[in-house]
Image (spheres, rainbow, N blue to C red):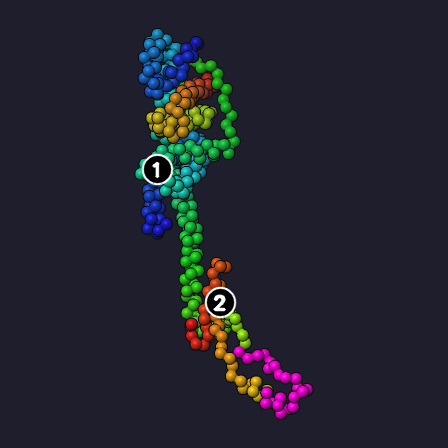
């Protein structure tokens, strides 16, 4: 590889790093629930990007590639660490909003814990669709699965998360 | 509280705009007559809004800079290693080329290695047995042996080893100059 080409390649990499570091960190944090894990994940994602710069189909728009690799890296990190115990979902009840009276930090913590209780694929689908706001077809492409399967994950995740929040609310009231 | 469980998934998708168009009309007509599913719909919309609000969460101060520094440091180290691998053979070649004139024009103390080298003079003159030769004849033979002109000197070569065991450079260092 010529020196000039290597310099261009490095400049392109640094540009992508600066443009997308927040995105990768945010997604990694939502998937892993801890900033320190998100940092490790982001570092690994960008080192993979550096190694694979020549193989990315569309280097001008590496977003889809970064999402896909972030999901894979977070999955591996999540499997290496201690698993979170699943919650016992009780029948849902109506009433006041679970978020009423909660400070923003408490709400954030509740949502983060709720995300951790979801199955891996459900969490991935929910993060990409409801937080990142990607269309279902793009989520399906990133996750490497059919759109109908993604819809199933998204529906299950929304229902589980709602029940988790209701359960937390009941505990808080007792 | 009872639920229309068969509609739960549809309601969950509808709350986020993910229900296929072909199923929307049927769900809307069910929602119009089912207060439980309308309540579920409202709750799911609220939960979804809360989840979506995570998009606005700011990164802890300095985190992206820390990650960028770690990544760039790791990349720089990787590039340094790559350059070392690339430069090593070049450096060896330059070193070898730089050594050649020095070897050629200096009185090197390196031991020359001759190809098909034969000593210019025998280590000891081979003389006929003295027992059967008269002393005068033996003396003349000795003088002839020592005054005999040396045979033409063989080319001598300096052997220069490289990192590659298959590549050895032989440099002629005989008095007559490079051949």
Please name the residue shown 39% across and 10% down the image.
B36
Disc number for residue A85: none
Please name the residue shown 52% across and 31% down the image.
A82
Answer above or below: position of B17 versus B57. Answer: above
Q: Quadrant of residue B57?
A: top left
Q: Quadrant of residue A152?
A: top left
Which one is closest to the eye, mark 1 or mark 2?
2
Q: How many marks?
A: 2
Name the residue beneath numbered marker 2: B159
Answer above or below: position of B88 versus B134. Answer: above
Helix or strand or loop: what does disc 1 sit on? loop
Q: Is residue A95 within the magenta segment?
A: no
> Which class describes the residues within 10 Å of circle 1: few (<14), some (14-19), or many (20+)?
few
Answer above or below: position of B153 versus A151. Answer: below
> Which class describes the residues within 10 Å of circle 2: few (<14), some (14-19), or many (20+)?
some
Taking depth in this image into account, of A28 and B28 the one nearest to the observer is B28
> What is the chain letter for disc 2?
B
Q: Position of residue A150 (x, y in %)?
A: 40, 24
Left or right of A124 on screen, residue A60:
left
Q: Position of residue A127 (x, y in %)?
A: 39, 27
- Structural distance between the alpha carbons of marks 1 and 2: 52 Å
Taking depth in this image into account, of A74 and A167 the one nearest to the observer is A74
Name the residue beneath numbered marker 1: A57
Is residue A93 in sight in this rendering? yes
Answer above or below: position of A45 versus B77. Answer: above
Q: Residue furthest bottom?
A: B136
Q: Which residues are magenta?
A: B120-141
Q: Is residue B121 within the magenta segment?
A: yes
Quick check: marks 1 and 2 in contact, CB under 8 Å? no
Q: Are marks 1 and 2 on the same chain?
A: no
> What is the chain letter for disc 1?
A
Taking depth in this image into account, of A106 and A25 the one nearest to the observer is A25
């Amino acid at each position: 590889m010529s020196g000039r080409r290597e310099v261009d390649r490095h400049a392109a990499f640094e540009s992508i790093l600066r443009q997308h570091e927040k995105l990768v960190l945010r997604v990694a944090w939502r998937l892993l629930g801890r900033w320190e894990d998100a940092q490790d994940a982001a570092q690994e994602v960008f080192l993979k990007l550096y190694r694979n710069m020549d193989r990315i189909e569309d280097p001008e728009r590496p977003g889809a590639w970064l999402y896909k690799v972030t999901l894979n890296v977070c999955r591996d990190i999540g499997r290496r660490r201690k698993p979170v115990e699943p919650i016992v979902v009780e029948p849902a009840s109506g009433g006041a909003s679970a978020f009423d009276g909660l400070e923003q930090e408490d709400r954030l913590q509740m949502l983060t814990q709720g995300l951790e209780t979801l199955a891996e694929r459900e969490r991935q689908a929910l993060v990409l669709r409801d937080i990142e706001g990607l269309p279902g077809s793009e989520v399906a492409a990133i996750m490497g699965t059919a759109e109908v399967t993604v819809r199933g994950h998204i529906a299950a995740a929304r229902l589980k998360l709602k029940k988790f929040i209701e359960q937390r609310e009941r505990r808080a009231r007792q | 509280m009872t639920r229309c469980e068969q509609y739960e998934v549809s309601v969950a998708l509808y709350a986020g705009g993910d229900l296929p168009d072909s199923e929307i009309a049927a769900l809307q007509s069910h929602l119009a007559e089912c207060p439980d599913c309308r309540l579920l719909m409202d709750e799911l919309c609220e939960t979804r809004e809360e989840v979506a609000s995570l998009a606005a969460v700011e990164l802890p101060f300095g985190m992206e800079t820390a990650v960028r520094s770690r990544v760039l440091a790791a990349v720089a180290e990787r590039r340094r290693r790559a350059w070392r691998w690339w430069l090593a053979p070049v450096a060896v070649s330059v070193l070898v080329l730089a050594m050649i004139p020095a070897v050629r024009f200096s009185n090197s103390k390196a031991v020359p290695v001759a190809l098909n080298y034969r000593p210019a003079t025998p280590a000891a003159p081979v003389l006929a047995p003295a027992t059967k030769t008269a002393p005068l004849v033996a003396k003349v033979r000795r003088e002839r042996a020592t005054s005999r002109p040396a045979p033409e000197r063989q080319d001598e070569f300096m052997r220069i080893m490289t990192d590659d065991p298959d590549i050895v450079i032989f440099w002629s260092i005989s008095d007559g100059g490079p051949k």
